[in-house]
Image: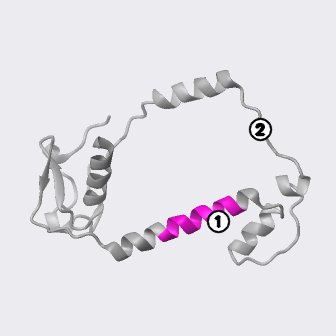
Amino acid sequence: QIQLIRGITKLLVAENPSPVVYTEKLWRRTIVSFSPDHERINHLMNQRKSELADVESYITTKECKMQFLRRALDEPGAEHCGKCSSCLQHPLLSPDIDSGLLHAANLFIKHADLPLNLNKQVAAGAFTQYGFKGNLPASLQGSTG
């Protein structure tokens, strides 16, 4: 439930102008009304499904991977690369996974805290509805974290 709310909030914040704003550790409504653009949502969903199908086709194809990519990108060139798993007829990497290494990688990802260095200036032309220009006031600047 909480993840769903976070996802919806992220979508609302991405709208321009945004119907919500985060201030003083609270999410607040703005005067902007929101109605979902169902046509855009359906278009994006269909595009993602198509992209996923393309990736699955690339992974499972028996033809040269480079030829597959060239055809998908409408590029000339039909020769086999001779270097991909399809051309060599075996996996380029071992499919066997060391369970200890997998566990260590999972722990690393879960505990990898990378600092985010936030901009102190507003990009030109961004958030014009809020009147932001140039440097953000210190009270609105995010801190590294």
Q: Is residue 79 magenta?
A: no
The spot of residue 24 in percent (x, y) is 12, 42
| Figure quadrant of residue 144 | top left
> How many other residues sit within 10 Å of disc 1, few (<14), some (14-19) or many (≥20)?
few
Q: Is residue 59 above or below residue 140?
A: below
Residue that badge 2 annotates: 95
Looking at marks 1 and 2 on the same chain, the residue that comes earlier in the sequence is marked by: 1
Locate residue 67 relative to residue 134 in the image: left or right: right
> How many other residues sit within 10 Å of disc 2, few (<14), some (14-19) or many (≥20)?
few
Q: Quadrant of the N terminus?
A: top left
Amino acid beneath label 2: Pro
Amino acid beneath label 1: Asp
- The residue that appears at 22% across and 59% down in the rendered structure is 134
Residue that badge 1 annotates: 54
| Magenta stretch: helix, strand or loop mostly | helix
The magenta-colored residue range is 46-57
For marks 1 and 2, give the CA distance: 22 Å
The spot of residue 2 in percent (x, y) is 28, 42
Locate residue 75 relative to residue 5 in the image: left or right: right
| Figure quadrant of residue 116 | top left
Q: Is residue 55 magenta?
A: yes
The spot of residue 92 in percent (x, y) is 82, 45
Say which element carries label 1: helix
